[in-house]
Amino acid sequence: MIILSDMRIGEFMASLLGLNLSGSLLLILLPIVVIELGLVVFSLVDLFKPERHVVGNNKLIWALVIVLVGTIGPVVYLLAGRKQN
């Protein structure tokens, strides 16, 4: 059983995920994960705006690209997927 008061929150989350990461490695990875999630959320919110038009006129395909391709997916959408009005 894991006692939360005996360990840091990052170590607790890593143990829940079954990862064996040191505290310093978690401090390095946390900003990267937050930036990645922020990029995905920002791209999806922008994609599903009613006034947004996309290349290929298929928002579902772009949503799959954003979510499934990783960091490159949202970047490709933001740089090439949006049509300028």
Image: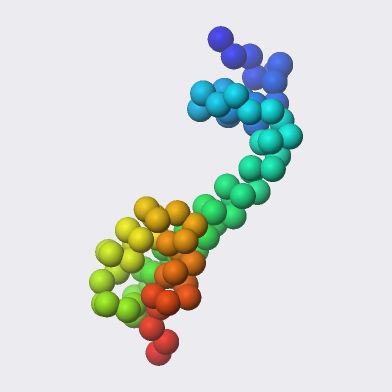
Residue 41 seen in this snapshot: no
Compared to 59, does 16 lie above or below?
above
Q: Position of residue 81 (x, y in %)?
A: 39, 75
Viewed as shown, does residue 17 lie left or right of 57? Answer: right
Viewed as shown, does residue 74 lie left or right of 60? Answer: right
Residue 2 seen in this snapshot: yes
Q: Nearer the viewer, residue 58 or 19?
A: 19
Residue 5: image quadrant is top right
Viewed as shown, does residue 41 lie left or right of 12? Answer: left
Q: Position of residue 30 (x, y in %)?
A: 64, 43
- State how many labels appear: 0
Compared to 11, does 70 lie above or below?
below
Compared to 13, does 72 lie above or below?
below
Q: Residue at x 69, y 43 (%)?
A: 28
Q: Nearer the viewer, residue 60 or 18?
A: 18
Looking at the rendered image, the quarter that the C terminus falls into is bottom left
Q: Nearer the viewer, residue 76 or 85?
A: 76
Q: Which residue is drawn at 61% across and 50% down?
A: 32
Q: Nearer the viewer, residue 67 or 76?
A: 76
Compared to 39, does 20 lie above or below?
above
Q: Residue at x 73, y 34 (%)?
A: 24
Residue at the farthest right position: 24
Q: Position of residue 38 (x, y in %)?
A: 54, 57
Looking at the rendered image, the quarter that the N terminus falls into is top right
